Amino acid sequence: MSKPRRISHSILLSTLLVTASFATENLGIIGIDSTTIDDRFTSKQTEVSNTATISGETVDEAHIENIQQVLNRIPGITTEVTGGDKFKLHIRGVENQRYMGEKPGVAVVIDGVPVFERTGSVNIDLDNIESIKVVKGGASYLFGEDALSGAVIITTKKGAKNSYSAVGVEAGSFDYRKYLLRGGYATDTYNFYVQGSQRTSDSFWENGGYDNKYLNSKFQYYIDDTSDITAGIELSDRNKDSHGTVKGVTEAETNPTSAYNGTGDRDYARKFDVQLAKYFLTYAKTINDSSNLLVNVYQYNDNTNFISGPIKYDTSGAKVTADDAYGTNNDYFQIQRGIKSELRTSGETFATMLGLDLRDNYYENKTNILQSYCTRMGATACSNPNNIKTAGTITGNDETDENVYALYGELKYALSNDLVMTGNARYDRITMDYDDTLNSIQIKKTFNVGSYRLGTTYALTPSSSLYANVSTGFRTPTVSQLFAGDIDPTNTKVESNHALKPETSYNYEIGLRGNTSWFDYDMAVFMIDRKDYIMANVGQYASTDPANPLYTATQYDNIGGMRNKGFELSLNTDRKETFFFDVAYSFIDAKFTQYDNFNLTLGNSYGTYVSTLTNPASQYTIEHYNLTGNVVPRVPKHTLNLSVGYNYNEHLLLTTELNAKSNYYADELNRIEIAGQATLNLLANYTAKIYGYRFEAFARIDNVLDKFYYNTARASGDANSDGIFDAEDLSITVNPGRVYTAGLSVKF
């Protein structure tokens, strides 16, 4: 009977062959580092893109409530926490201007499964992470749709080393609680574990509490000395209410918890009930000394229910102030199924990878009116039945079948002992079949999209290398962007555009990586140019203009452009040393290169349109702007994460962390600037092994100095209807301030 250690070595034989020694006499065996399925290929020595990896041990040691707290250690990454451990992430400032739940411009893959949630956010069980790998730059050459600025590949724990048992409990500020129970077992031929966890909190914000439950299991079977099969399942049940937003800087000061009193802001969407299920099966086979095969089959289910659209006026036209007065119930269901396979070869001169990606996705969306209301203000307007929405009315019932057929590959060729060229290419055929049963509409659309990467690495010394690449990413139009007028034929304010093209990003990058006797380093300069950017003709989240024939209806078109350029630096030392540190710094200059049309609404958009505003409480007007050259909002130019650790002895680890970012604009007009901020965090970990049991206790303090700042700040119009667009129109989520967390766990 084979030993797991020997089998594991056999399965990873190609990984060992991948490692290229940058000795000037001989480059050695080269291989493919890229994969969309697993994390077993982790060499950076011939990688032509800027990448970063965070180990599961680092995540476990951080004792975080959300993944933002570790992703801060990667330069160029920004995240928006939407409650608990759920987050939306951005790379190099791409899509920071979006905030209504759209896709983030980043491909997210968990255990080979391309994950896309209805709200644009991502969730992951933080207690089950083996590694997080970030690939920056256009990454559609591997991952396809939406990899405009890169990809995040998360692998969960598996293998004999993770077949341990454990119990754990944590507690913290705002009645935060975490409970974990894990059981595992390993033999010479198989290993498995089952883990359940729960995170719950009352939250700093009014109605901001959450309750997240996870159940994970993974089974790995060693078929023979050269192959294994892994089956995994992850179930989650997540309940979250409000994000905790307030309206304007005054309320942020006086009512930071967003306690609702009938006059404050209400989140656009609330009361999320999300049930997720992920199933996958991965087969790995070492064919011979220079080739291997990976095959992954998966299914990902997302059933999301939430309410949206705060009601402004009742059926008589009177103002509504009730906290739970929302107009729409949303019931969304999706199934993502697929199969991926990758075949790799390695050699002294060249290496190859050929991949196949087949997806069968189904999306179903149903909406209905929760409470009767009027879409305008005043009794006169509400006497018109066209302005009344009646409770129980079905407003949406549609489904979309999406199929993806993609072939991709990579060729790596050694031109000399020091110079390696890498080429990637991918071809996607994407078909969408839309069926609106409410309006008896059936629409089909097909896109054929190619993407690529071309790069090189050059060994300057045995311990340093120069790398450069150009790569692309793409995003196809959504059904609503393509067929808005067809889907809602009675709405004269929206128009279809069947001629929409996919958006493309072009990433240009040059970097230097290496190591010294003291630290590892990686630095890169980059530029991401976005072409054929899909934008509404009236601007992002803006309004139509009744007085201008060009903007009386909203239509999406390839009329926008952006350019993000900057510099990134990471320095990392050995965490086993008595003192160690990590530095992540980024500079990003992001601007609109084409943004000709933006309609700013001033006054009450539910009131009467006038050309000259005299009573903003009951009237509104539209101002037109050209925002070409403006800075992309919510992208700080400078961000810095500095982490310093001290191993006091073999049991006690002390860590301090500084997070800082510079000023940024909250709006596309660049009128409202948010001050920069810096926060300090402290963490103490104590571990001890007693009678074969590994005990770990920790205490963590975030925002030690109790700094007041905003987690998010955004604005796109006159939210308080006073006829002026200023800081009082911001939608703000205030940081909770100083937060304490402590816990105890036992592994055996």
Image (cartoon, rainbow, N blue to C red):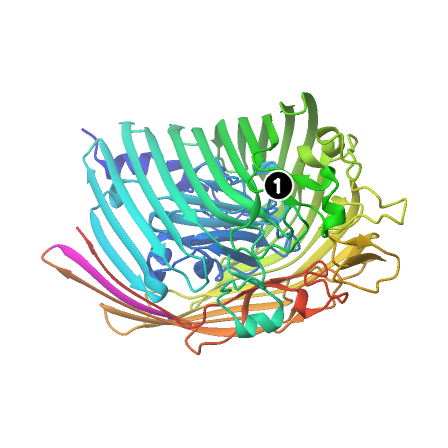
Vertical placement of 515 versus 121: above or below?
below
Question: Can you say whether 439 is above or below 93 in the image?
Answer: above
In this view of the protein, can residue 146 be seen by the observer? yes
Please tell me how many numbered marks the rendered image carries: 1
Image position of 401 with respect to 153: above or below: above
Q: Residue furthest left?
A: 691
The percent coordinates of residue 64 (x first, y second) are 38, 59
Q: Quadrant of residue 489?
A: top right
Q: Is residue 159 left or right of residue 629?
A: left
Q: What kind of residue is marked 1?
A: Asp
**Prevailing secondary structure class for the magenta stretch in the rendered image:** strand
Residue 438 against residue 119 in the figure, above or below? above
Spot occupied by residue 103 in the image (x, y as percentages of width and height): 60, 44
Of residue 265 and residue 564, the one placed in the foreground of this image is 265
Return the residue at label 1: 146
Quadrant in which the N terminus is drawn: top left
Left/right of residue 700 with respect to residue 671 in the rendered view: left
Which residue is at the front of the view, 46 or 166? 166
Q: Position of residue 393 (x, y in %)?
A: 60, 33
Residue 358 visible (yes or no): no
Residue 694 within the segment the image draws in magenta: yes
The picture places residue 144, in percent across and down from the top left corner, at: 60, 36
Residue extent of the magenta highlight:
692-701
Question: 619 or 301, which is in the foreground?
Answer: 619
Residue 217, magenta (yes or no): no
Q: Which residue does the image show at 54% across and 28% down from the upper left?
A: 361
Q: Nearer the viewer, residue 630 or 165?
A: 630
